[in-house]
Image (cartoon, rainbow, N blue to C red):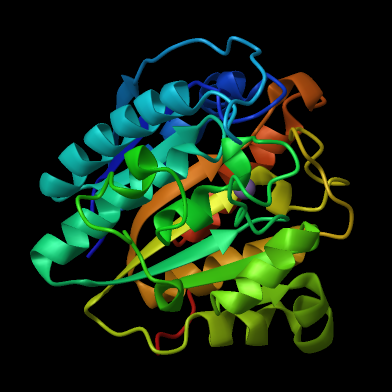
Amino acid sequence: MTRPISIIGAPTDVGAGDIGARMGPAALRVAGIVEAALATDGGARDVGDVSGPDHPRAMPEGGYRHLPLVTKWAGAAAEAVGRELAAGRLPMLLGGDHSLAIGSISAVAKHCRGSGRKLRVLWLDAHADFNTSAITPSGNLHGMPVACLCGYGPAELTMLSGAVPAVTPEQVRLIGMRSVDAGEKRFLDEARVQVFDMRCVDEIGMRQTMEQALAGIDRDTHLHVSLDADFLDPDIAPGVTTPARGGPTYRESHLCMEMIADTGLLGSLDIAELNPARDTRNQTAELIVDLVESLFGKSTLIRPHG
Ligand SMILES: [Mn+2]
């Protein structure tokens, strides 16, 4: 059973210090994301872009840069994602910076609460995105979405799902980390977030990493994937705002997606932090389209089930 996909664009970078991620949805459409979604069993429709305020290039206030603006965009994303989930569809949110995931995952958490589904969030990222205003080096809210979703953040963001926290650390798996701030490292440990960093991928491989990250799911689980483009090694994906060396290779990334596809439980997806201003010939957007095809079950061969 493949649910029909709804593509939602959110062209913003208000959660980041540097601009550029606002062009992400356009670059993904140019690279064929809509056609890739249309080719899935359930079909797809592009519902267009949500809108919101521009990036004013302001300084942080009270530990947050652009908090009211991030709140507006996250709210718009939550509304659009919630509407598609309610219609029985699979929302694919095209960012935009990663603070948008506060909106999308809040909507997903609310939907799962209402429908009695269990939620597992797979956060694929070079960074942990677990900063708070007290420990952030930059004030950029795209470095804080996981913390906000777990209840650590400003009320206007932590309350978006209608309950605090929107998700518990037990529902989240961080995968691919290799750049974690000092305060963030301590806070991840304190909050008992389950992290599969690149050392883990190096030591046990992507296959076992994903087996462990997916352990405990069952037919009642809604899987949400939040893919930050900087999860991928910058050698293959240079078009991001905050690259970090030593990420998953092309093959490791595909295996990661294929193993998620094999569960048959993917319920919603974010694609974040693609920055076409840093890209070369749209190669990062094209790679993401390839990976999304794997995520929705495109495989080289017909493989035995089970
Ligand atoms: Mn991120």
Which residue is rendered at x = 59% and y = 68% of the image? 174
Residues 57 and 198: in front is 57
Q: Position of residue 271 (x, y in %)?
A: 52, 42
Q: Is residue 23 visible?
A: yes
Task: Determine the residue positioned at 81% across, 53% down.
Answer: 233
Quarter of the figure with the C terminus: bottom left
- Quadrant placement of the N terminus: bottom left
171 left or right of 131 in image: left
Q: At 40% from the left edge and 85% from the top edge, which residue is drawn? A: 305
Q: Using the image, determine if residue 217 lies above or below residue 65.
A: below
Residue 299 appears in the picture as rendered: no
Seen from the viewer's position, the closer of residues 195 and 215 is 195
Q: Is residue 85 above or below residue 306?
A: above
Q: Is residue 205 left or right of residue 62?
A: right
Image height check: is 53 above or below 303?
A: above
Image coords of residue 284 (percent x, y): 72, 36
Quadrant of res 206: bottom right
Q: Nearer the viewer, residue 254 or 102?
A: 102
